[in-house]
Image (cartoon, rainbow, N blue to C red):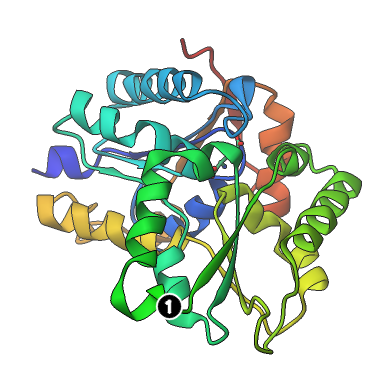
Amino acid sequence: MTGVATRPIGVFDSGVGGLSVLRALHAELPLEKFFYVADNGHAPYGERDDRHVIVRSHAITRYLVTHQHIKALVVACNTATAAAIASLRRDFATLPIVGIEPALKPATAHSQTRRIGVMATRGTLKSQKFQTLLRSLQTQAQTQTQTRFVLQACDGLADAIEHADTAKIVAACAQYTSAMGRFGMETGSMDTLVLGCTHYAFATDVLRSLVGEGVQFLEGGAPVARQTRRLLEQHGWLAPSADADTEALQHAPTQFATTGDAEVLRGALQSWLHLHAPVQVLAIA
Ligand code: DGL
């Protein structure tokens, strides 16, 4: 099955947020080729209706399957996972698909104060998938009595991160963390903060300065990367390493495409992944 194994893995997000997941994928799977699509031209997803997110997710997946011949797909967007992963799995039944969801479960294991903050898009928080996850944790015997999740929809934050607008990022983070309540290690405070949107990983410095050093941040990139490895192993589709020379090992190529402004993605690649990579502009319909 070497033919399949040498194909790329598709990764998409509404924009640059999925780069936080790609960073984890690069670390976990350095031999793999990736094709990353930032759907900047149709972002943000989190404040649009489900229909929009589903249509975009299917169009991008179709493009990646048909034109890039991907062997697996990573939906590097909480909002798209919540809205579209079930229908993607139905329509692309032979394609291994990994999604991302807010790390509520690990958060319950981490939190000492039993009070957990969750920042995510409006779309993710109101989705059935998220509500089901929340209910399942709240009704588990060991958590039902004490754990409280403080949910915060962060309108505008992903968009500010998308455009690297520092003033807006700081203002939005300050507004939302203060609306959530008290952070810290003492009883009644939130000692754990779930970053339930892949964009927010790029605001951790700002958030850290607002909530304090001790608060534990949880994002989903590393578990997604491990799950991608597991799925590829199960299929026998991990990229072959036997004949890879050292050069290839260090630089398994990733291709980048956007449906919007190439400069936005190029800038994010430089700031966050320290990559100077070419960006293709695609009209994916
Ligand atoms: N990065 C996306 C997520 O993880 C959402 C950003 C957007 O609203 O487009 O939910």
Residue 185 to residue 189: above or below: below
**Ligand 1 has an atom within 8 Å of the beta carbon of the residue at disc 1:** no
Counting other residues with Cα less than 10 Å from the Cα at mark 1, is it few (<14), some (14-19), or many (20 or more)?
few
Q: Which residue is mark 1?
A: 145
Residue 109 to residue 219: above or below: below
Residue 54 to residue 118: above or below: above
- x 44%, y 75%: residue: 108
Q: Tally the numbered discs.
A: 1
Q: Is residue 46 left or right of residue 25?
A: right
- Measuring from the top left, give residue 76's x and y in whole percent: 46, 44
- x 32%, y 60%: residue: 136
Q: Could you say which is closer to the camera, residue 134 or residue 267? A: 134
Residue 180 to residue 15: above or below: below
Give the residue at the far front of this rendering. 145
Give the residue at the far left of this rendering. 1
Q: Is residue 93 left or right of residue 219?
A: left
Give the residue at the far right of this rendering. 167
Residue 179 appears in the figure: yes
Please name the amino acid that badge 1 sits on. Answer: Thr
- Measuring from the top left, give residue 162's x and y in whole percent: 71, 38
Q: Secondary structure at mark 1?
A: loop
Q: Is residue 101 left or right of residue 88?
A: right
